[in-house]
Amino acid sequence: MELRTTLAQLLTEPESSAAAIIAPAPGLVVSYKSLADQIERLASQFVGAGLKAGDVVVMVLPNGVEFLVIFLALTRARLVAAPINPANKGAELRYLIAAGQAKAVVAENSDSGAAEAAAALSLPVWQPRLAPTGVVELVNLAASSRLNAEAPKPDDVALLMYTSGTTGQPKGVPLTHRNVSCSATTIAAHYALQPEDRSLVVMPLFHGHGLIGAALSTLASGGTLIVPPRFAASGFWPLFREHHATWFTAVPTIHQVLLLRADGDGAPDHGPRFIRSCSAALAPVVLANLEKRFGAPVLEAYGMTETAHQAASNPLPPHPHKSGTVGLATGVEIATIDEAGKQLPANTAGEVVIRGPSVMHGYRDNPEANAAAFVEGWFRTGDIGVLDNAGYLSLTGRIKEMINRGGEKISPKEVEAVLLEHPAVAEAAVFGVSDTKYGEEVWAAVVLKSSANENEIEAFCRSRLADFKVPKVIRITSSLPKNAMGKIVRHDLAVLFKAVSN
């Protein structure tokens, strides 16, 4: 498949009457022609509203036709789309909107958190509406005379996403049209996606996994997206059958849920052309059970926000897909380096580094992070891995302290900062503990300075953090293990408290 350099080139046949998006909940089908027309119309509206190339517009939206149309229209107008998780709470939303220096917010009328955050920053909120015809409108964005939006350039920033940093503050990842387009077309080519393919989207579109890995790759191939508003395990296979889906991609947590429920839900023993897993490690036994139960190859992949999602993946049969690896480099180069930055030979563990057209140029307004993130043009992932003689990558650990809960990356320092706001908490340490369902769970240990219990502290966190960031377990202790420099040793806590709970 020919690589494309802007998202304006994503749709290969914009005049086609074939289905681009199916929205099962309202029962709507949007053709490629309708999608292309809507993108042009909304792009001209954005230009008519006075937005300039490079302006950031925050999107706080669930999965749906609205998300995809608005995202593509923003990028068509040379604007920067910044999708944010709707589960974020007020302070989190305000921080992310302000950090992006957004000019406007797109959010549903029912989203009071987004509205309050926008109001606090004196920003307009544009509310999407999906007409029965499948046409997306922004009801409070004034219609304008038809203005032709200037075509985006490959090095224009198209997408601004945030990834948690080890300092506790999310880092802005600006991805250009070239980054995103190359990634989407590479994914489509790697899995040999065709117009006959249909992807059932289960991952949130505000993440690269759902947006680039599932949605944009499918649109680049001329295939069809089936987009329910959210993942529901009980409805997954009925939707898969009804709309003749051929593949899906998800985090291991979702794969395990589908596997656990397969017999009770009457899941087919064959049907998908392939199943993709990404964003967290998939245990080899789970991969084997998935293949046995669903009769399809399960292809584990590897990616991150900074690489516009996918950087490696196992290939389709007849090429070998090796359990326990994340496959071969896709559209990028992958190497491993030692602590001095020297590249290592095959079968030697080192830090995984990546370079290529889908890799970001640098974090937004963060020279310190950029200095640490690149070495001689290679992006340092913070992951430890080994490349075998055939180029298959196995990940063996992480340098960074991020907690990976089912694909959601959580900064311990961010959660610690909230815990320390509690009036009874003197010290706090947050750490990841291995978990069969999510890969890792968030745990916390606290030292108190006045009376409080675990339930009270959890409720305090829940009022300030998205649910997936709230510690599953909170332990009250008299002291925290520290090294000679006085730094808390999270690994010791994970071992200690996991042992106590068993």
Image (spheres, rainbow, N blue to C red):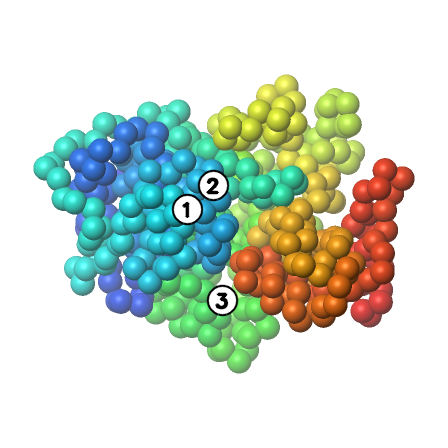
Residue 83, disc: 1
Q: Residue lying farthest left?
A: 145
What's the residue type where badge 2 is placed?
Answer: Met
Give the residue at mark 3: 270
Q: Earlier in the sequence, mark 2 or mark 1?
A: 1
Give the residue at mark 2: 161
* Tally of numbered discs: 3
Is 49 on the left-hand or right-hand side of 250? Answer: left
Q: Check disc 2 and report its element: helix, strand or loop.
A: strand
Q: Residue lying farthest right?
A: 484
Which residue occupies 45% across, 33% down?
A: 175
Q: Earlier in the sequence, mark 3 or mark 2?
A: 2
Whether pointer 2 and pointer 1 mark residues with C-beta atoms closer than 8 Å, the reply is yes
> Is the N terminus in the top left, top right, bottom left or bottom right quadrant?
top left
> Is the C terminus in the top left, top right, bottom left or bottom right quadrant?
bottom right
Q: Assess disc 3: are there few (<14), some (14-19) or many (≥20) residues with their C-alpha within 10 Å of its C-alpha.
A: few
Q: Nearer the viewer, mark 1 or mark 3?
A: 1
Q: Earlier in the sequence, mark 1 or mark 3?
A: 1
Which residue occupies 51% across, 42% down?
A: 162
Q: Check disc 1 and report its element: helix, strand or loop.
A: strand
Which residue occupies 49% across, 67% down?
A: 270
Q: Is residue 183 visible?
A: no
